Structures are given as structure tokens and as C-alpha cells.
Amino acid sequence: MPHKMSLDHVSLLVRNLDASEKFYTEVLGFTPIHNGTTLPHIRWYGIGGIDTLHITQGDFADTKLHKPTHFAVNVEDFDGFVADLRARNIPFWDWPGQPNNVTGRPDGFRQIYVRDPDGYWVEVNDHTREVA
């Protein structure tokens, strides 16, 4: 029998908590939230609603990162977000890999990809929840 589920959180292994915190709060605008573990090498961030990001500082040596392995967030003012990245000289890419370019997805939404300090790919798009 199928069970109704929703995303609770994404967890990433990072090299440096402070560098990652700066990216996720200052570039993407995530909000620090209560860390239920109370462990000093873990931090939690609110993304919107009940979705959260957990980052854990640890040994990153075996981690391999490729663009198809990413997580995505949507932003209400996509054009404003892209303009802000350009104004702050923060690099982003389209899906094929062209710098500072926006991709139109087959479903009609637009997307870009940014990389965090550890090289994780984060898709930012204007996808609305009304359309799957």
C-alpha cells in the first residue's frame, strides 16, 4: 500500500561549517534553526515550510560530486535572485554548463545551478508547487 510522504530534510557532509553557513545564509537566504542534536559539528537551516538542510562537518575525502546529484529550491522572484547573484559576482551555470546563463526546462520553468563551498550543486528555479 502506498504511503503519503513529503521531504523532511536534506543532509550534506561539508569540510567547513562556517564557510557553508555563509553560503547557505548569505547566498541562498536559508535561516539557521534549532539544531535538535546539539552537536557542535552539525547545523540546521530552514528552507521554507518544514523543509530543512542539515550540514555536518566531517571527512570529505571519499565524496564525489556531479551535477546530476543535486538538490533544488524554488524562489518566488527568480529574476531578482539571478540579478542579485550577478551584482555580487557569484557564479552560476545553466544545465549544460555555460556560466551565468539561465536554462529553460522542458516543463517551462527556468533554472540555474550554483555551487556551495564544497562543490555541491544546488538548483534554483521558478517552479511553482501548483505544477508537478
Image (cartoon, rainbow, N blue to C red):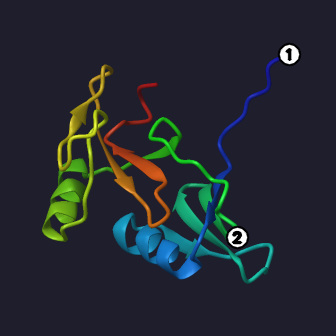
Q: Position of residue 77 (x, y in %)?
A: 25, 52
Q: Secondary structure at mark 2?
A: loop
As displayed, is residue 92 above or below residue 5? below
As displayed, is residue 89 above or below residue 1? below
As displayed, is residue 105 above or below residue 46? above
Q: Few, some or many C-alpha atoms within 10 Å of disc 2 (few <14, some 14-19, many ≥20)?
A: some
State left or right for residue 130 relative to residue 49: left
User: Are dots 2 and 1 in contact, CB under 8 Å?
Assistant: no
- Residue corresponding to mark 2: 58
Instruction: Judge by depth and name the residue closer to the eye, 77 or 44.
Output: 44
Q: Quadrant of the N terminus?
A: top right
State left or right for residue 27 relative to residue 11: left
Q: Position of residue 44 (x, y in %)?
A: 64, 69
Q: Secondary structure at mark 1?
A: loop
Task: State which tag comes first along the sequence, 2 or 1.
Answer: 1
Q: Which label is found at residue 82?
A: none
Q: Position of residue 116 (x, y in %)?
A: 44, 62
Q: Which label is found at residue 1?
A: 1
State left or right for residue 100 relative to residue 32: left
Looking at the rendered structure, the kind of residue marked 2 is Gly
Instruction: Judge by depth and name the residue closer to the eye, 20 or 78.
Output: 20
Q: Position of residue 63 (x, y in %)?
A: 63, 53
Residue at image x 64%, y 63%?
A: 60
Looking at the rendered structure, the kind of residue marked 1 is Met
